[in-house]
Image: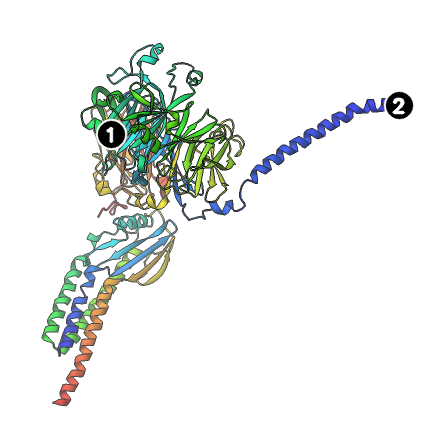
Amino acid sequence: MKALSRVLMIIAALSLGLLFLFPMWKIYLEAPQYPEGLEMHIWVNQISGSSESVLQNFNILNHYIGMRPIHAESFAELKIMPYVVIFFMITGVIVGLVGTRKLVLAWVALLMVGGAVGILDFYLWLVRFGTNLDPTAPIKIPGMTYIPPLLGHKELLNFDALSLPSTGSLGILLAIVFAGIAFYVSRKKEVKEKITA
Amino acid sequence: METLISKFKKVAPKAALLMAVAAGAALQGCNKTGGDDSDKAVDSDAASAVYVAPGEHDELYSFLSGGFNGQMSVYGIPSGRLLKIIPVFSQFPENGYGYNEETKPMLQTSHGFVPWDDLHHPKLSRTDGMADGRWLFVNGNNTPRVARIDLKTFETVEIMEIPNSAGNHCSPYPTNNNEYVIAGTRFSVPLDMKGGTADVSMEEYKDKFRGSISFIKVDKEDGDMELDFQVLVPGFDYDLANGGKGPSNDWVFFTTYNTEKSATLKELGASQNDRDYLAAINWKLAAKYAAEGKAHEMPANYYHNKLDHGSFQAKSEVKKTVRYLLPEECPGMMYLLPAPKSPHGIDVDPTGEYMVVNGKLASSLPVFSFSKMEEAIKNKDFDGEVNGIPVFKYESVLYGEVKEPGLGPLHTEFDGKGNAYSTMFVSSEVVKWNVKDLKVTDRIPVYYSPGHLMIPGGDTEKPYGKYLVVMNKITKDRFLPTGPELMHSAQLIDISGEKMKMLLDFPTVAEPHYAQAIKADLVAPNSVKFHKLDENTHPEAVKNEKDVSVTRKGKTVTVKMTAIRSHLTPDNIEGIQVGDTVLFHVTNLEQDWDVPHGFAVMGANNAETLIMPGATQTLRWVPKQEGVFPFYCTDFCSALHQEMQGYVRVSPKGSNVPIKFRMGEKRPVPPATASVN
């Protein structure tokens, strides 16, 4: 692999760093009584929101329908995921330095699998929160579950929930794109090298 | 022929009666038309000028004093919408101010707990001569006090008693950078020079009675007040004041009446001299004299009450001395300008050159010149002295007089375009006149008998000459009748053009005296939405439901309780006994805007207390009989607000029911609890 591909690969690895700077996913809630809206931000290592006390405010709303309170401590993922990301960053840089095409492919594939697992895990959490409701909840609507959307809009009682990937996820996308380009560019080079040889 | 005459004689009285009735009807009709005519004074586009669409905000905050309700009212301008009532000197059962343990000390004075006052004049704090939107200073007239309202929370955060004063009417006037807030006494009293008034006969008024002018220092950062010194002045009535600006920045001017020093039937006794005085004090020089050791010290006894914003608790400090200056020992500090009989308002124009004295009993409105005053000081152009204070010759300091401005001028404000606007109490109108040529240019009837008027920033260097609010003393027929007592009426007038235009009538709470207004964007962005729970330093605060407690110490039971949608923790309490003092320290765990919880107990000889998110408030309750007493949240907080209630069991004195409390049955997962990040 030539310098360009190596550099692209290293950029790919480093772009995962965005995950530590920005949330991966944002859930927006809107209701008549919340003109300023409520936002929950999901990071690789924490849950935050549009205000410091957003989790408390989510939980206050959720307790009427018997949803379990959301606490950052209850997600083992938030402790594991940062290491996974660091693992991908370090191995990505090594792959860039080593410069083996096959490793690039393997890295990208593993990253995509990792991303998919992450999204699946996220979805399972949403289902768990949305369906595993306290039977003694004050507000019970027969047949109603409250699974927030994974992507896009959903009406949940008086709330309009909107769920979208955020800047942090762009890090994964960029990593895949850059590594993909590195892979593609180096392929051409190798073809050329073969011809000239 | 005869028959015709006799017929006429018979008919004439009937005809006359008929005509009289017709004339009466016509006259009454006229009357009605008169009323309609006055309505035509309202401009056709008035509605759109004051219309603030639903969801939109007003352009300005205005702060109207409540007079005898001891509160401040906050209105939006131009809509005239009431936004808030701020309790200052009066207990306010609506939120527990002056009833709960935290705020009771705010109303402590050297006379004990005084739960009411007569709040007259609001003044916004200033930076470089302009209202800065940080604090609002207000006076208590009856039991002399000056209070400070923090405009981040719209709460009263400080109240200071003024010693050696009575009728603190001439108050509180900030200098252009809040160096001082100045407070003068309207009722001179015999000072015992030991912190109180002396036991003397009113016959001795002339010799024994004195006034005082207090100079309160304001901390630049946090606004805390401190009484720096007082100036003991002749025993007149000091009515109103205003600070200079620009060239007259270092001066404050005070109107006086009762220079006759009459002690009884003042309405006559104080109205004998054709001239009273406008007093001028150089506050910078006074401060210098005080700093340079000209000040004497005397024992005093006055309260200084401050609300701590971390713990929400007010604490009182009793001050035991006060420093004072005597004008006769401080040359150049104080002068007297002769002013027409019993003047009321004194208002300094935006340039700081003209001092307008509103002589309520005079036929003309005198305007004094600051530069002429300076000249007269230089030339020692005096006409005798009073208690060692030089008196100027009227002509040597007079700029001119506004001739026949109207009847009963009380107050004047300025639009920053060279015009002055004065209220005429007796002729019930606002009169516009030009400050330079002193000619009246417009007049508009107001309803009825105006006292103060206010132009936003009209008392500063740069008024916002778009609106004028006039506060009237008499309402009569302006609104639907509500029995003998009516809300006072204020009117909003457009002063952006040549002619004044009547825009709006709006009812005001109790009796507004003065008002202030400020562009909303100087205040709104700083408005606190809720208190951060982790910054709550109240000693009895509980920040987690797990930490609530009920403990007995002798006859006092301390309940540390939390409130969050939609339960109080604990909500079942036992072990209280008749005659105990129960202190409910309720912490509102909410961390969201506009989610206060209220707390009230059946039979408590107390008000409720309203707890803002993140704050702790304490309600004191002494149960008088055994039984079960419900308590509940009084502020509709959520869909399950009605369920936010609990019970206290009260047993007889000496009962062996132990202290016990709970909230809910044991559950695998507790309901929402606070989780402060």
Residue beneath disc 1:
B285
Does the image show residue B222?
Answer: yes
Residue found 85% across the figure and 22% down from its top: B6
Q: Residue B453 carries which label?
A: none
Count neighbours of disc 1 (C-alpha within 10 A) and say few if under 14, some if 14 to 19, many if 20 or more.
some
Count neighbours of disc 2 (C-alpha within 10 A) and say few if under 14, some if 14 to 19, many if 20 or more.
few
**Left or right placement of residue A30 versus residue B485 in this view:** left
Name the quadrant containing residue B552.
top left
Q: Residue B3 carries which label?
A: 2
Residue found 43% across the figure and 22% down from its top: B341
**Left or right placement of residue B386 versus residue A171 in this view:** right
Q: Which chain carries label 1?
A: B
Quick one: A66 or A83, which is closer to the camera? Answer: A83
Q: Residue B539 in the image: state x and y as whole percent.
A: 20, 34
Q: Mark 2 lies on which chain?
A: B
The secondary structure type at the circle numbered 2 is helix
Does the image show residue B97?
Answer: no
**Left or right placement of residue B65 versus residue A184 in this view:** right
Q: Residue B397 in the image: state x and y as whole percent.
A: 37, 29
